[in-house]
Image: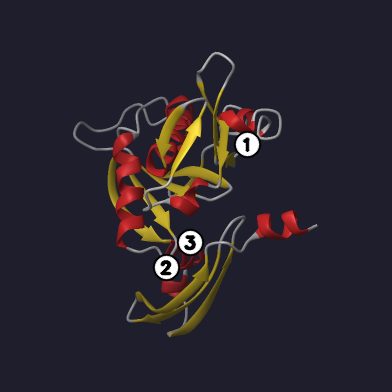
Amino acid sequence: MCRNKPVGVSMIAGIDLGTTNSLIAVWRNGQGEVIPNALHNVLTPSVVGLDDKGRVIVGEAAKERLVSRPEKTVANIKRYMGTDTEVNLSGKCFRAEEISALIIKSLLADAREYLGEEVDEVVITVPAYFNDLQRKATKLSGELAGVKVERLLNEPTGAALAYGLCEKTESRYLIFDLGGGTFDVTILEVKDNSVDMLVSDGNARLGGKAWDDSK
């Protein structure tokens, strides 16, 4: 289980830090492998809360308390990355990057349990429309979680690479990214084995959750 890692080689993982759900994956044995959490699910709800003893809980356990303990639980924090917004959980104030760091810590703990070793570095995907402040806040979240953020990768580019667009016919492609909390559309150009983003636009308030709330 990757225990015999050569000295000096870091274990790097990819993190999809989503508005509604997050996940972590690694590349090994020639393929990408999504890591399950303690509940054996590959998706971890991006929800953070405090239990009745003041301990931090993340994921499904926190999500179940959104209705019963809303004053101790927060969701959709990604929408506030790069802003001065703070959330109050039982009298404790947290910035968006601090809440996101708790989610990343939970993912790293799942990876450590699954792989049998620490993850040293991560690549985190971000929406293509994220501005500089939002990107810096995302990077800070990783650092607060105690891991080096090797780079931030635009979500549409990540989707294109995962799909193997670099190996496709040189052309322009439309990436339609509809998430639980955000929506964006990006046009990528594949040329000379490289992927270039030509234009991207999106809505940080439109996604599956918006439709659920409208029912």
- Chain-order first, disc 2 or disc 3: 2
Residue drawn at x 33%, y 49% is: 137
Number of numbered markers: 3
Residue drawn at x 32%, y 38% is: 11
Residue drawn at x 57%, y 28% is: 72
Packing grade of label 2 (10 A; few <14, some 14-19, many >=20) is: some
For disc 1, the marked residue is 41
Which residue occupies the foreground of this view, 171 or 127? 127
- What is the x, y in percent for residue 127? 45, 62
Colouring scheme applied when the structure was drawn: secondary structure
Packing grade of label 1 (10 A; few <14, some 14-19, many >=20) is: few
The answer to which image quadrant residue 69 occupies is top right
Judged from this view, the residue extending furthest toward the front is 91
| Above or below: residue 106 compared with residue 26 | above
- What is the x, y in percent for residue 32? 47, 49
Quarter of the image with the C terminus in it: bottom right
Q: Are marks 2 and 3 in contact (CB under 8 Å)?
A: no
Identified by mark 1, the residue type is: Asn
Q: CA distance from mark 1 to mark 2?
A: 29 Å
For disc 2, the marked residue is 129
| Above or below: residue 112 compared with residue 156 | above
In this rendering, position of residue 98 left or right of residue 34: left
For disc 3, the marked residue is 162
Q: Are marks 1 and 3 in contact (CB under 8 Å)?
A: no
Res. 146 visible in picture: yes
Residue drawn at x 57%, y 20% is: 51
Q: CA distance from mark 1 to mark 3?
A: 21 Å
Res. 120 visible in picture: no
Identified by mark 2, the residue type is: Tyr
- Which label sits in the foreground, 1 or 2? 2
